[in-house]
Amino acid sequence: MSTNTHATRRRKALLLGWGILLVLLTVGGYLAFQGTSADALNQPPTSNQIAQGRQIYQQNCAACHGVQAGGQDHKQPKGGIQADGTQLAPALNGVGHAWHHDNTLLFNTVKNGSVASDSPMQGFAGRLSDDAIVSVLQYIKSLWPAAIRTRHAMNR
């Protein structure tokens, strides 16, 4: 193989490498500026999100967390363990401790299920879109007293 052919191949390989790097940087930059779906929870909710979230909540969450989001046992708003060893669904209306968690954890819990291995909370990734999860969480946050919403917003 001649030196000229070898140099041409090296040049082409180098250009291809730079081209791939440029594409990766462009795609990575685009994705970095898109943020995550959980970031949408940092914005004030719209009335449409709250209305849609209420409907989604009633269809998917109320059976465990209660129609008014008061949890399975009003005497144990943070949840707890039942006599049979299963967990009680906690209140989500501000009297439990959901508001102690940041938006990313709240979003991921609804989407992927609880990180606690003994929790019955299963994820909704296959049933709800990211936008629907944001709406239901905006609805839940709308149930919190103003002081809790303010405190939560400071700790995102």
Image (cartoon, rainbow, N blue to C red):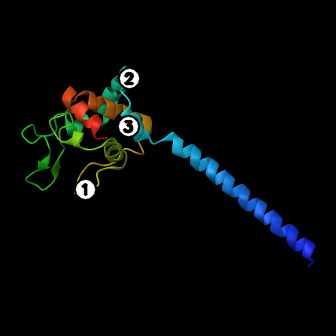
Q: Dot 1 lies on which element?
A: loop
Q: Nearer the viewer, residue 105 or 128?
A: 105
Report if residue 114 is visible in the image: yes
* Left or right: residue 59 compared with residue 23: left
Instruction: Name the quadrant of the C terminus.
Output: top left
As measured in the structure, the alpha-carbon distance from the residue carrying label 2 to the one carrying label 3 is 14 Å
- Which residue is located at x 30 percent, y 32 percent? 57
Q: Residues within 10 Å of mark 3 (few under 14, many from 20)?
A: many
The picture places residue 77, in percent across and down from the top left corner, at 12, 40
Residue at which label 1 appears = 116
**Viewer-nearest of discs 2 and 1:** 2
Whether pointer 2 and pointer 3 mark residues with C-beta atoms closer than 8 Å, the reply is no
Q: Dot 2 lies on which element?
A: loop
The picture places residue 35, in percent across and down from the top left corner, at 47, 41
Residue at which label 2 appears = 46
Q: Residues within 10 Å of mark 1 (few under 14, many from 20)?
A: few
Residue type at tag 1: Ala
Report if residue 145 is visible in the image: no
Q: N-terminal of the two: label 1 or label 3? A: 1
Instruction: Name the quadrant of the N terminus.
Output: bottom right
Q: Nearer the viewer, residue 94 or 66?
A: 94
Residue type at tag 2: Thr
Residue at which label 3 appears = 133
